[in-house]
Image (cartoon, helix red, strand yellow):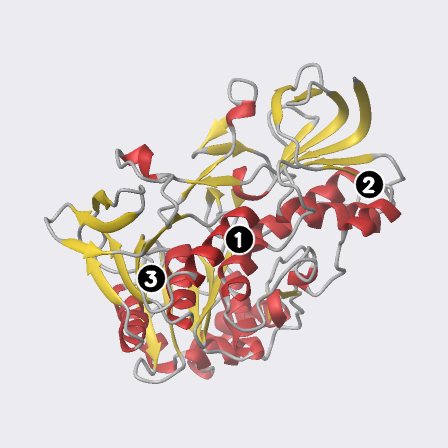
């Protein structure tokens, strides 16, 4: 069996849904677009799985979190795809891709031809077996990457109320799952090898704030060691976790969140790979001009960082997907992808965002005993990254705009003294709008940034540094 489409998206995650919506906005015709997904359901907002899906009261369930509600856009149910003439091929694994012949072969033996291919295959959760530990198949060992994982985790949680959970890992999924487990009245112990949680992003000071709060909720942290093995009962169920430092933790359930690996195997040897993903140019085009890549698999240029990066976050998936549809449908009108990296998370009553690059020296600010605080990252004399907990929409927008501008910084102590005002003062001069992300937050992808205040500041500096306040007088645009 063989059929063909003008455009094919392989992978049915967040990026596929946002790309589909953008295709329709830009006039894709019926029967031109096909999405092939290994999952049995239409694309959905994956972040919901570690948050509202796990809530004990009024949990989120499909169809309420299909894409693209995370960006306050349309809810794309299966009916929506049908009405727009988009072919959804669900529950179907792609066995091989030949980018030279422009064909895909599915597990059912069907050949699908395309003129343009978008790779949105996402990533898979790293398994314990990859690190020499057996036990992933035990009924009370859980991962969280897709809807099936989330359903399984809910079932295990419901059987463990009042019991003990061990969370392996200290990153995004581990921290969010730990919060949900506590909400479900389960005792939690977190185990990770690093000195503090979220080590790829958080400074020790920031991490300490969240760890202290988690501990106030009963969460125990075991740092600096790793899982070495499990203890099992006669039914193959995990009863305890053995650590490399020789200690043992009783466990009624285990949640593993130790990272992900991009799904690139279908394209190895056919497309240029770098940094664990598929290398693309500023228009998200791979080394084959009929193939594009978005989301977790894409390694693309990030101007602010001055290097190519692969970003593992839903905001990047959404924005790369929308941009690639624009590039394909309206190439003459669409420039290169200009993206300000954004990472964010919500757990308990916390809500933080990080914009930019966490390189260089760190300046902390705000009340680390209260509910609003943050940090700036200064690299080579310029602001390159900003973190804020507990901000308002205006405050989040301000730190995003300030980071995008990369103002020069001469005095770190002064920046720390000004704190949030460092960004807020400059933001009053910026006429910009940032689109919303999940649940009313904002995410800046600046396609055509406008910096009128920046040019003014540059002239003012040239005229008289002493005549202006710190922000206006000591910064000029440097890229």
Say how many tags the image has. Answer: 3
Mark 2 element type: loop
Q: Residue tagged by mark 2?
A: 86
Label for residue 161?
none
Neighbour class for label 3 at 10 Å: few (<14), some, many (≥20)? Answer: some
Q: Give the SS element for disc 3.
A: loop
Residues at marks 1 and 3, CA–CA distance in whole angstroms: 30 Å
Q: Nearer the viewer, mark 3 or mark 2?
A: 2
Q: Secondary structure at mark 1?
A: helix
Q: Looking at the image, which is closer to me, 361 or 324?
A: 324
Name the mark nearer the viewer: 1 or 3: 1
**Disc on the earlier residue, 3 or 2:** 2
Q: In screen coordinates, is 204 left or right of 112?
A: left
Residue reaching furthest to the left: 246
Q: Earlier in the sequence, mark 1 or mark 2?
A: 2
Q: Report whether 178 appears left or right of 70.
A: left
Q: Residue 151: which disc?
A: 1
Q: Position of residue 215 (x, y in %)?
A: 27, 73
Density class for disc 2 (Cα within 10 Å; few <14, some 14-19, many ≥20) is many
Residue lying at the far front of the rendered structure: 234
Give the x, y percent position of residue 181: 39, 65
Residue ID at (25%, 51%)? 239
The quarter of the displayed image where residue 393 is located: bottom right
Q: Is residue 201 visible?
A: yes
3D distance between C-alphas at marks 3 and 2: 41 Å
Q: Is residue 346 above or below residue 3?
A: below
- Looking at the picture, tell me which residue is in the foreground, 202 or 107: 107
Q: Nearer the viewer, mark 1 or mark 2?
A: 1
Direction from residue 239 to residue 186 in the image, left or right: right
Find residue 98 and report its image quarter: top right
The residues bearing labels 1 and 2 have C-alpha atoms spaced at a distance of 27 Å
């Amino acid at each position: 069996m063989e059929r063909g489409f003008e455009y094919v998206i392989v992978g049915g995650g967040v990026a596929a849904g946002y790309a589909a919506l953008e295709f329709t906005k830009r006039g894709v015709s019926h029967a031109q677009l096909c999405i092939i997904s290994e999952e049995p359901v239409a694309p959905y907002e994956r972040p919901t799985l570690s948050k509202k899906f796990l809530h004990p009261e009024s949990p989120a369930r499909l169809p309420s979190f299909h894409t693209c509600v995370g960006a306050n856009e349309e809810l794309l149910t299966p009916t929506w795809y049908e009405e727009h003439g988009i072919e959804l091929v669900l529950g179907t694994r792609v066995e091989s891709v030949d980018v030279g012949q422009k064909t895909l072969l599915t597990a059912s033996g069907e050949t699908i031809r395309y003129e343009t291919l978008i790779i949105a295959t996402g990533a898979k959760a790293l398994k314990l077996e990859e690190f020499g530990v057996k036990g992933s198949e035990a009924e009370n060992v859980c991962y969280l990457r897709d809807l099936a994982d989330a359903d399984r985790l809910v079932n295990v949680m419901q059987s463990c109320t009042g019991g003990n959970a061990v969370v392996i890992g200290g990153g995004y999924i581990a921290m969010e799952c730990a919060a949900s487990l506590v909400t479900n009245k389960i005792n939690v112990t977190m185990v990770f090898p690093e000195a503090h949680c979220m080590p790829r992003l958080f400074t020790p000071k920031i991490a300490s704030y969240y760890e202290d709060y988690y501990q106030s909720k009963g969460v125990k942290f075991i740092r600096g060691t790793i899982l070495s093995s499990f203890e099992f009962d006669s039914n193959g169920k995990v009863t305890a976790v053995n650590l490399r430092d020789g200690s043992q933790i009783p466990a009624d359930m285990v949640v593993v969140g130790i990272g992900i690996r991009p799904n690139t195997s279908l394209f190895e040897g056919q497309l240029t790979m770098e940094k664990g993903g598929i290398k693309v140019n500023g228009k998200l085009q791979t080394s084959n001009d009929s193939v594009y890549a978005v989301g977790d698999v894409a390694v693309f240029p990030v101007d602010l960082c001055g290097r190519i990066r692969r970003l593992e976050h839903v905001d990047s998936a959404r924005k790369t997907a929308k941009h690639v549809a624009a590039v394909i449908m309206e190439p003459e009108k669409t420039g290169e992808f200009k993206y300000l990296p954004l990472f964010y998370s919500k757990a308990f009553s916390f809500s933080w965002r990080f914009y930019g690059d966490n390189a260089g020296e760190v300046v902390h600010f705000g009340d680390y005993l209260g509910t609003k605080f943050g940090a700036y990252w200064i690299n080579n004399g310029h602001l390159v990254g900003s973190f804020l907990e507990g901000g308002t929409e205006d405050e989040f927008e301000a730190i995003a705009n300030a980071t995008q501008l990369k103002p020069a910084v001469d005095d770190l102590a002064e920046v720390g003294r000004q704190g949030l005002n460092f960004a807020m003062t400059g933001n009053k001069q910026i006429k910009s709008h940032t689109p919303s992300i999940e649940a009313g937050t904002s995410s800046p992808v600046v396609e055509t940034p406008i910096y009128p205040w920046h040019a003014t500041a540059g002239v003012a500096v040239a005229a008289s540094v002493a005549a202006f306040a710190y922000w206006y007088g000591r910064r000029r645009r440097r890229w």
